[in-house]
Image: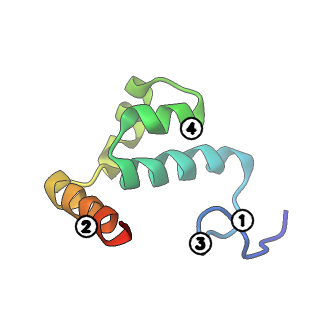
Amino acid sequence: MAYTGRGAIKGLLPHGPHNVRDVLATHILKHTCSYEQASYAIQDTPETVAKHYGRFLPQDKAALAAETLNRVWLAA
């Protein structure tokens, strides 16, 4: 499928079917810090996500939580 610029993740170029799982799990993990959320997205277990994608979990969870809260308060 050709890149149309209308993908779910801005700027993401074309990926084969085997890469989609990796891209999706990594993206969700980086934005939610939730193994469970990423596991739902790729239809696997949280343990598998932790084992294979855990290195992408942001190290400073407090900063990520503060950023999320700030977005919520600004949107309200």
- From the image, state whether disc 3 or disc 2 is nearer to you: 2
How packed mark 1 is, by other alpha carbons closer than 10 Å (few <14, some 14-19, many 20 or more), is some
User: How far apart in space, not on screen, are marks 3 and 1 (Cα)?
Assistant: 12 Å
Left or right: where 67 falls relative to 26 = left
Quarter of the figure with residue 30: bottom left
- x and y percent of residue 68 in the render? 29, 60
Residue under pointer 4: 41
Label located before the other in sequence (4 or 2): 4
Residue under pointer 2: 70
Q: Are marks 3 and 2 in contact (CB under 8 Å)?
A: no
- Report the number of numbered marks: 4
Residue under pointer 3: 10
User: How far apart in space, not on screen, are marks 3 and 2 (Cα)?
Assistant: 22 Å
Label located before the other in sequence (1 or 2): 1
Q: Which residue corresponds to the image point at 32% horizontal and 46% vertical from the top-left?
A: 33
Q: Secondary structure at mark 4?
A: helix
Q: Amino acid at mark 3?
A: Lys
Query: Does residue 29 lie above or below 71 as drawn?
Result: above
